[in-house]
Image (cartoon, coloured by chain):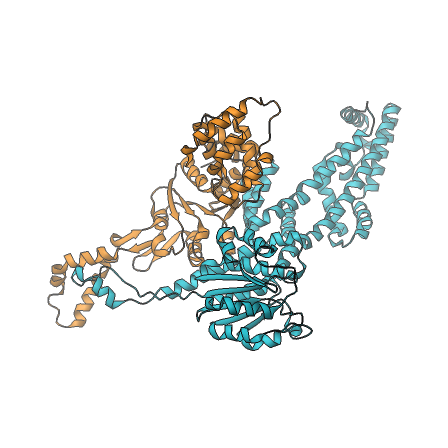
Amino acid sequence: MFDSVDEVVGQLGGQGYICGKNIGTVVYLASQLEKPVLVEGPAGVGKTELAKVVASASGRSLIRLQCYEGLDEAKALYEWEYSKQLLYTQILKEKFAEAMSGTTTLKDAAERVGREDSVFFSERFIVPRPLLRAIQAPEPTLLLIDEVDKSDPEFEAFLLEVLSDFQVTVPEIGTLTSKHKPLVFLTSNDTRELSDALKRRCLHLYIDFPDQALEERILATKVPGIEQRLAEDLVGMMQRLRKLDLKKTPSISETLDWARALLALNAKQLDEGLVRDTLNVILKYEGDIKKAQGELGKLLVKRAEEPAAAAPGAAAAAPAKKGVLH
Amino acid sequence: MQRKIVEFTNLLRKSGIRVSMAESIDAFLALDELSLEDREVFRDALRTTMVKRSEDIAGFDQLFDLYWSAFYDNLRGAFDQAVGSMGGEFDLEQMLKAIQQGLQGLSGDQEMDLSELAKALLTQDLSQLEQLIRQAAQGAGTERIENMLQIGFFTRRTLEQMDSEGAGKQLRDLARQLRESGMPDAQVDALLDLIDKFLEALRQAVRNYTERELQQRNFDYMEKFRRESLLEKSFYNLTEDEIRKMREVVARLAQRIKNVLSIRRRRLKRGKLDLHTMLRRNAGHGGVPFELIFKQRRKDRPKLVILCDVSSSVANVSRFMLQFMYSLQECFTKIRSFVFVAELGEVTPLFKERDISLAIDKALDGGETINVYTRSNFGHAFHYFWQNFLAAVDNKTTVLILGDARNNYNDPRAWCLRDIHNKAKDVVWLNPESPSAWGFGDSVMDKYLPHVDLAEECRNLKQLSRIVDRLVL
């Protein structure tokens, strides 16, 4: 699939996902060793995106399982289609009567029904859920198990079983084995500690907030219209903002949103008025916004060569456009 | 290489990073797939296979540098310095070329049999040198080093083990022979000088290695201990820094309890088939049960009233308990919280408006709600509660009191607590003092005990979480 770490980085870059060698190494190893990858990191750094991009870079189809509290086997693996089974029995009533004809005792009849029950417990009546679909898929797939930490510990134990050998036993049918071992990505926001057993089976990847240079590259790729200078200022401010003790630290997705917003506002440079009015794009809590506004002077590092005359005009223009953001 | 990785794995384990057998095997498999020229890739491969908790990453990076890169860099530095100190016009390349020529000039029987160390020194093969130093250190038993005083001893033993003196002698002999075979005197002198410098650099490198070994052995107590003990450390003696860290630990612990609770709840909820409702609901399908209905049990979430002593002696305990309780908000139907020293005041609204940690600071800093600069008076506080807030207590309410019951010889007014107890479902008292101190000095804990369903010592996070666990069950 991939031949080297550099190739991985290159291919992901080709899909618009800019990453460092650390991510490349893990993805490469995952494809070579056929091991699942557990991706952790703050919200919005591109964990889910990574899985999607790897899928398209490697030409695999993506099967996604979104985890949530209360997710169980029936929702993740397979389920018997109870109503369909019932519907069939209703429709086939006469056929049953035919099959039953000639039986004299109840025991005989039960015997006969018993012989026929495989009709109702066949793949026809199974609803495959993401895990089973990944196992049954005729071509190689990428299975994304999103936000495993949201699921319950019981489900985690069950997942372990599936991930270890990629086969599922359906009691009525038999064991279903995968034709191709899917590439598995699990993502977690670290809201709870996952079990050691699960972690042991996975390669671990921690995606942190990118550094200034990397974030600028990401910005340039994702928001092509932005001017270099504005991009630099913007990323610099985000980097400083992340050092504050905020309830929700803004992430790459916020950087991109902000850049797009500024682009829509036709802003040429960052100044205090503009930032004050657009802070609600990057910060999602009232308390955070207040805090950031208090520190605005420190966050916005003035450029030495900045022409002082440009600032008031932009500040006056900004409030009028505020409506766009709300 | 394999041996080094196993050693490194052991180092990780000693430092409190759990690496299982399967994981170290994964590391080997991963390294097989990669070219190891790039140090970054090498580190990422080790990290992704062996370190599975994001908290451990910082520790891993530190250890990686300590074990893999720093020593080599140091070695390089020592030798670069040795060459650099030779003076401006000295050129190592030229010298090596001259030696090469000189060696070719020597006849077969004069040819020297140089030891590996001497060769490595002469050719500046640093990775070979690193290997030799590691081997020698192993032979010398450097891994048994225990304190600073032994550094000199083990350095000497390692040098002896690798026979640095022998190598030095061989190199000097070589220089002499080169002189005899017609090398210019100035060059030979420079060579002799260089050899001395190299030997000194080697000694330094070995010493550095020994020091590093000591650091590695001591690494475990640094980080791991701190984290472990935060759970068990008494609230009384936390530093500022630890209080900050503690907030995270509390949040995590609360999350864990929530998880456990959600499982318990779900088990309760998954009731039996509700035949009555099901038949009624499926009447439309001619009585064929298309839709299955299960009985759902009603959840019984407790109400909570918290009374917190916030006098300076127990302020920290109060802080963490409040944080804990409010992190668990959704486990209770309602929480009302009060703080007191002598006066008592309600702080519930603070928590509605603000971020938890901010609200707690606000509640504890005082001034606004109550005067915190007085002496504790439990009797007065309970009486005030009894007068004004008794209606907040009903038979579904658990009253949680936190305080050391040091009443400064005031009237305990235990009857107030008795009345509260009569109305409440439970009264739980958390006391940061150990039971042996209850009732001694100005402690009136013994007066209150008859009206309390559960009194527990609560001095650290572990005890707190155990009590909370029992409370929300």
Instruction: Please identify the quarter of the rendering in which residue A324 is found.
Output: top left
Residue B77 screen position, x and y as percent? 75, 35
Residue at the spot 52% in from the left edge and 70% down from the top edge: B386
Q: Is residue B34 visible?
A: no
Instruction: Please identify the quarter of the rendering in which residue B289 is found.
Output: bottom left
Residue at the spot 86% in from the left edge and 31% down from the top edge: B193
Task: Check the picture and name the quadrant holding the C terminus of chain A.
Answer: top left
Chain that is coloured cyan in the picture: B
Residue A138 screen position, x and y as percent? 33, 43
Residue A276 screen position, x and y as percent? 51, 34
Which shade of the palette goes to chain A?
Answer: orange
In the image, A104 versus A234, the foreground residue is A234
In the image, B103 versus B30, the foreground residue is B30
Q: Is residue A93 visible?
A: yes
Depicted A101 relative to depicted B66: above or below: below
Residue A155 screen position, x and y as percent? 42, 56
In the image, B260 versus B11, the foreground residue is B260
Residue that lies at the very extreme toward the bottom in this rendered image: B450
Residue at the spot 86% in from the left edge and 34% down from the top edge: B173
